[in-house]
Amino acid sequence: MPEKTGALKLEKPKFKTAGVLAIAAAHLIHDVYSAFLAPLLPLLIEKLSLSLTQAGFLSTVMQLPALLNPLIGKLADRASVRYFIILAPATTAVPMSLLGVAPNYGTLLILLFAAGISTSVFHVPAPVMVARLSGMRKGRGMSIFMTGGELARAIGPLSAVAAVSIFGLPGLYPVMVVGLLSSLWLSWVIKDDRPRRNPGDRSRSSLRDSWRLLKSLMLPLSAILVFRGFMHGAMATFLPTFIKAETGNIWLAGSALTVFEIFGVAGVILSGSLSDFLGRRNTLLVSLIGAPMGMLAFTLTAGWLRAAMLMLTGFTLLSTTPVMLALVQEQAQDRPAAANGFFMMISFLARSAIVVVIGYAADLAGLRTTYILSAVLGLGAIPFVLMLPRGR
């Protein structure tokens, strides 16, 4: 009897567009709520008579749960990550929508800490599910996923201001309905997804074991995040201040940040898909050469050339995140959520510490000198890209 030569041919996993778009939409809705704090902060300061130190500590408390990201990742590797993702929009929407009714500072801290835990619970496992739904196009999936988060940076503050203008600060709580409905919708959309699990192996492994297996990836990625962090911290945090000092035009200062973010979204959309074809390391190299060069030229030029360099910097600098997320998932072996937990924790620590360093340097030497120094330091990421394990 003749053999069926095609019987054993393996079918490549397909890109599940509906599932990836659903999680990206959840990312957008979730991050809109987590962006409420900044626009509501002046109202909270006035209502509760907070000092600026107390106000600044609110953001720190909300970000503290990021230190638990590796542990959350380990737990997510033992369970179905879909439950983490389904619940997060609701569990973030509720505390963030209750900020206006908080009677005192202590209650604010509790609400923001709860929202911070929910934020970590979403952001650690969500890329794991996106990677699984993306099949061989993990870069494309990460680009779509991160586009939701980038858009939320612009929509979140506007949504908070609009809600307060309609309901008032104490009456803000009805807006949690969107987050609750989002979780219900997600429970239906991704109800049939089941992860490929090997709980026996993962349950016996510790975070130290996971780090040992992932060390060859995480060490060069950590260095990249640090060197990239100087550019990202300077641009994302101090760009309006820099433009205002250079031009004296507050409208232009605000517009510059908008332009930076818009071209960053474009970079996020394209970079992951490009990395599927060009390779993760090649795409990172192009971005991490273009970003410091663009930032340096932006600092030293003026007029339309400065505007063009701002666009280039936004496009290349923010385009690195989907590529790194795809690389983490490809190299994660049987610990995808733990790997993403380590990555998110390192990113948080690098970002939080470096912004303080940049501010201190700007106080000593001025923002222009600090921007030049940050761009030069950004070039330090290039050798570590070459140390990354090769992807597919």
Image: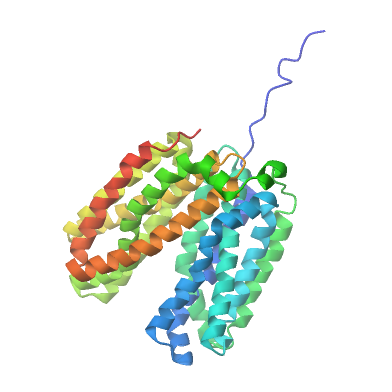
Q: Residue at x 49, y 55 (%)?
A: 344
Visible residue check, residue 102: yes
Residue 214 location, x and y as percent? 51, 42
Left or right: where 343 falls relative to 364: right
Q: In which quarter of the image is residue 359?
A: bottom left
**At x 63% / y 71%, what residue is drawn?**
178
State left or right for residue 100 relative to residue 202: left
Across and down, in percent, residue 392 comes to 51, 33
Is residue 179 or residue 328 the one in the foreground?
A: 328
Query: Is 150 drawn above or below residue 200 in the view shown?
Result: below
User: How many badges with numbers are in the image?
Assistant: 0
At horizontal 23% and vertical 65% (from top left) the residue drawn is 361
The relative height of residue 69 versus residue 136 in the rendered view (above or below) is: below
x and y, in percent, of residue 353 in the image: 37, 63
- The quadrant of the image that shows the N terminus is top right
Query: Toward which corner of the image does residue 189 lie, by quadrant?
Result: bottom right
Residue drawn at the location 71% of the way across and 65% of the way down: 184
Foreground: 68 or 304?
Answer: 68
Report which quarter residue 24 is drawn in. Answer: bottom right
Please identify the residue farthest to the right as the structure is shown.
1
Q: Camera-side residue: 216 or 351? A: 216
Which residue is the extreme one toward the top?
A: 1
Q: Return the x and y of residue 90 as percentages of the image width and height.
A: 65, 69
Colouring used for the render: rainbow
Specify whether residue 139 is in view.
Answer: no
